[in-house]
Amino acid sequence: MRFGIYAELQTPPGKPHAQMTWEISRQIEHADAVGFDVYSVIDHHFFQKFSISANPLALFAAVAQRTKRIRLRTALHTLPLENPMRLAGQIAMADILTNGRLECGLGRGHAWLFGPANVPLEESRPRYDEAVEILLRAWTEEEFSFHGKFYNVENLSVVPKPVQKPHPPLFTGGTSDATYQMAGERGWGIFVPPLLPYKVLEGPLGIYKKACAQHGHQPDIVYIRPVYLDEDEKQIRKEAEAALHNFLAFNASPIESLQGESKKAELRAKGYGFYACGALESLTRLSYEEIVDQEIGFIGTPQKVIRQIENLATVGGIGEVAIVANFGGLEHWKSIKTQQLFAEQVMPAFHAAANPAELAALV
């Protein structure tokens, strides 16, 4: 099992964007030093509390110069809002600058991004499908032509080519059954949304695992959960409760831009029904105890979190546990604390590793 970290760059009002960006950079350096396998960063625009991560490839190119082994993954590029002919070259350049440590998530994107980006919501799926084909061909063919509804190119050569062949490892994620089916058919890894209890995910993950089996692929599920660790449960609550509530509230905050019955009807009609069902809003009403008991967050002692991950391993197909160590405006030192404790006390329970304390001294 791999162990990773996932960050949205949630930024509370009043916190300088530069400070948030540099804190995440230092947290990636620390994650590399203490032995995490991969660091994933969302690609997201327009809504500060949800995320200020407007250019993860630039972030990865920068931190790659100060890290040695950790892999760096976008989760996910919002393909319908991109020019895929240009994005293919940008991803290849980032793969070069990270010395082949790049991984790519390819997604349709959150429903609330399309209005501000001036792209019709109904174009999401067909733009995504065309962009995927263009990316794969751009990375693997010296020259290609493509004629679709949205993109038309003739005898196009995309340069540079990525270091990794045929291309960086690919992942996707989302809430629709079609996404899980497609990921299984293609053999891509899949992200589990970080806020939903596992019982809600059993059906879609079953679709994914069945499709993997039918097409000769091994499932690779990235299971994301906010994590906060300490030996003292009362201290955990004191240090993390407010940020944990913020994490849920910040994730739901862009829903305010999708209100009204006509908008909800449009979301349901155009394949984004999840955003009209009230699930995100309902999470903001959970108590601290409910968040912990429903395992929306793995919050507790290292021993407790080890047991929770052991339970995950029994369901099969979990290739990676990705912790959210920076959430809801959590202070930098608290994120580092969780990363350090997780590396020292949780990860060794699942595989032999170098001494995280010694590695941390290298930062």
Image (cartoon, grey):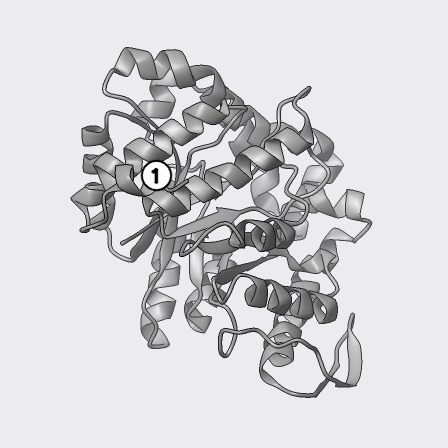
Q: Is residue 127 above or below residue 196?
A: below
Q: Is residue 17 above or below residue 43?
A: above
Residue at the spot x=78%, y=48% of the render? Answer: 117
In the picture of the structure, the residue carrying the numbered disc 1 is 360
Closer to us: 261 or 61 = 61
Q: Is residue 252 above or below residue 159?
A: above
Could you say which quadrant of the image residue 92 lies in?
A: bottom right
Direction from residue 309 to residue 242 in the image, left or right: right
Q: Is residue 239 above or below residue 65?
A: above
Closer to us: 71 or 138 = 71
Residue at the spot x=47%, y=43% of the render? Answer: 28
Is residue 173 visible to us here?
Answer: no
Q: Amino acid at mark 1?
A: Ala
Element carrying mark 1: helix
Q: Residue 62: where, in percent of width, then height?
A: 59, 51
Closer to us: 21 or 190 = 21
Could you say which quadrant of the image residue 335 lies in?
A: top left
Q: Residue 5: where, in percent of width, then height?
A: 42, 43
Q: Residue 307: where, in percent of width, then height?
A: 18, 36
Direction from residue 105 to residue 47 in the image, left or right: right
